[in-house]
């Protein structure tokens, strides 16, 4: 159809309109597609544009630790200072707000929320989201809500966006992505839903970064959002089967502690019981002895030391085979 030219910096209007409809349907927040939605090159660029547009040199950002690495590096890239906040284990990976309270200073501008959470798979309840919102309001913070895994949920869990709580859309930036929902990571399509001032600032930044997002990927995204959603339901069912296999594999495996099963996303964050190994050494050992790649927990922040992340974004067969190999290698190591 000849959709091979530049598009508006902010993204094509039909896609922004469809995103606004879907955000209203799924998250119960109303955004004006003309002024409050921007198409980005993945969730990653949504975060980049948000940090670059909102943060000044020396501003502080509360980030979950463990958490997705870009919260720290993206904040630094914008000249800001990340303040890592530990998660409370066994509480859906809720950030420890009492700890965060002690970190907050007049320079603190932002708190980053990620539910479902990478790397732990924790999904926050409405009550917990309310606590974060109260905290943000009390300290005059913007909430950046990374909702990359909003459609990958298990056991009937629901995703709650902080923007859906009373008046919170005025101080929340949703950074969304189509990558995980539609297995289209290579298409690079995500979005920002936020107050018009942030979108206006992000457009200025975009003018200097990409000019505009790949035109035909935007039309592909439109098809994904408007078409049958059966593939999404099927894929989440498939992830759930893999989740069970990994859970059983971890429970049987010496040296790996029984984890809290993830309620969203597609990762297990597992503590290992090999005191002589750091996270990196543990992962190197598994790579060398089991030919299985897992991610060292400290990649996600200092509090991830002693953990490793297992992803099940690979086939069911590879999940089974991978867990068997990890089991043999751990038996060899622990005698
Ligand atoms: N946010 C989280 C928590 C992620 O795990 C990822 C990718 O793994 C992203 C954002 C970025 O994804 P994308 O840029 O493909 O949308």
Image (cartoon, helix red, strand yellow):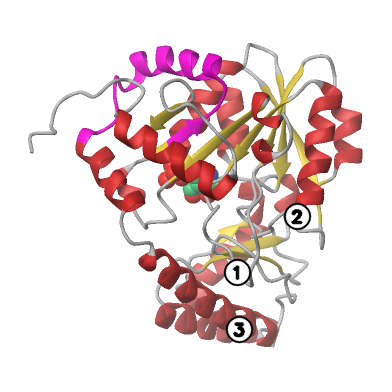
**Residue occupied by mark 1:** 154
Within-10-Å neighbours for mark 3: few <14, some 14–19, many 20+: many
State the CA–CA distance, disc 1 to disc 2.
Answer: 14 Å
Residue 42, located in which quarter of the rendered image? top left
Q: Helix, strand, or loop for circle 1? A: loop
Return the residue nearer the eye: 224 or 102: 224
Q: Which type of secondary structure does the marked residue at label 2 adopt?
A: loop
Name the residue: 61% across, 26% down: 75
Question: Does 5 sit left or right of 139 as displayed?
Answer: left
Dot 3 or dot 1: first in sequence order is: 1
Query: Looking at the image, can residue 291 be seen?
Result: yes
Residue 101, image x, y percentages: 89, 32
Task: Calculate the distance from the C-alpha at mark 2 to the C-alpha at mark 3.
Answer: 28 Å
* The magenta segment: 191-215
Mark 3 residue element: helix
Residue 41 visible in the picture: no
Q: How crowded is mark 2: few (under 14 residues within 10 Å), some or many (20 or more)?
A: some
Query: To which quarter of the image does residue 284 belong?
Result: bottom right
> Which one is in front in this view, the residue at disc 2 or the one at disc 3?
2
Query: Is 321 placed left or right of 189 in the picture?
Result: right
Would you name the residue on which mark 2 appears? 125
User: Which tag, 2 or 3, sits closer to the chain's start?
Assistant: 2
Quadrant location of the N terminus?
A: top left
Q: Residue at the location (56% across, 37% down)?
A: 70
- Residue 237 % position (x, y): 48, 75
Up/down of 47 relative to 96, above or below: above
State the residue at coordinates (20%, 23%).
6
Do residues under tags 3 and 1 come within 8 Å of each other at their CB atoms?
Answer: no
Residue on which the image places disc 3: 249
Looking at this view, name the residue that lies furthest to the left.
2
Q: Which of marks 1 and 2 is nearer the N terminus?
A: 2
Q: Which is nearer the eye, 58 or 266?
A: 266
């Amino acid at each position: 159809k000849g959709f091979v030219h530049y598009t508006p910096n902010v993204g094509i209007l039909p896609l922004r309109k469809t995103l606004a409809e879907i955000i209203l349907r799924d998250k119960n927040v109303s955004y004006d597609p003309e002024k409050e939605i921007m198409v980005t090159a993945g969730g990653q660029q949504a975060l980049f544009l948000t940090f670059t547009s909102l943060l000044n040199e020396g501003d502080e950002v509360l980030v979950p630790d463990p958490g997705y690495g870009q919260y720290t590096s993206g904040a630094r890239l914008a000249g800001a200072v990340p303040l890592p906040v530990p998660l409370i284990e066994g509480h859906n990976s809720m950030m420890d707000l009492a700890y965060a309270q002690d970190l907050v200073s007049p320079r603190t501008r932002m708190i980053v929320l990620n539910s479902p959470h990478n790397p732990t798979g924790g999904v926050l309840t409405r009550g917990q989201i309310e606590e974060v919102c109260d905290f943000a309001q009390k300290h005059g913070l913007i909430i950046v809500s990374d909702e990359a895994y909003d459609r990958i949920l298990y056991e009937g869990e629901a995703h709650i966006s902080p923007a859906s709580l009373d008046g919170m859309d005025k101080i929340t930036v949703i950074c969304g992505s189509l990558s995980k929902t539609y297995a289209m990571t290579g298409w690079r399509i995500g979005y920002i839903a936020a107050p018009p001032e942030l979108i206006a600032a992000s457009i200025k930044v975009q003018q200097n970064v990409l000019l505009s997002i790949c035109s035909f990927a935007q039309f592909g995204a439109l098809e994904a959002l408007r078409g049958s959603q059966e593939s999404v339901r099927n894929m989440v069912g498939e992830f759930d089967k893999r989740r069970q296999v990994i859970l059983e594999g971890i429970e049987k495996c010496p040296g790996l502690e029984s984890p809290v099963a993830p309620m969203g996303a597609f990762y297990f964050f597992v503590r290992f019981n090999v005191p002589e190994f750091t996270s990196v050494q543990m992962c190197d050992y598994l790579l060398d002895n089991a030919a299985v790649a897992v991610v060292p927990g400290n990649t996600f922040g200092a509090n991830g030391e002693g953990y490793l992340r297992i992803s099940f974004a690979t086939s069911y067969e590879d999940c089974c085979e991978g867990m068997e190999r990890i089991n043999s290698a751990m038996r060899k190591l622990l005698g």
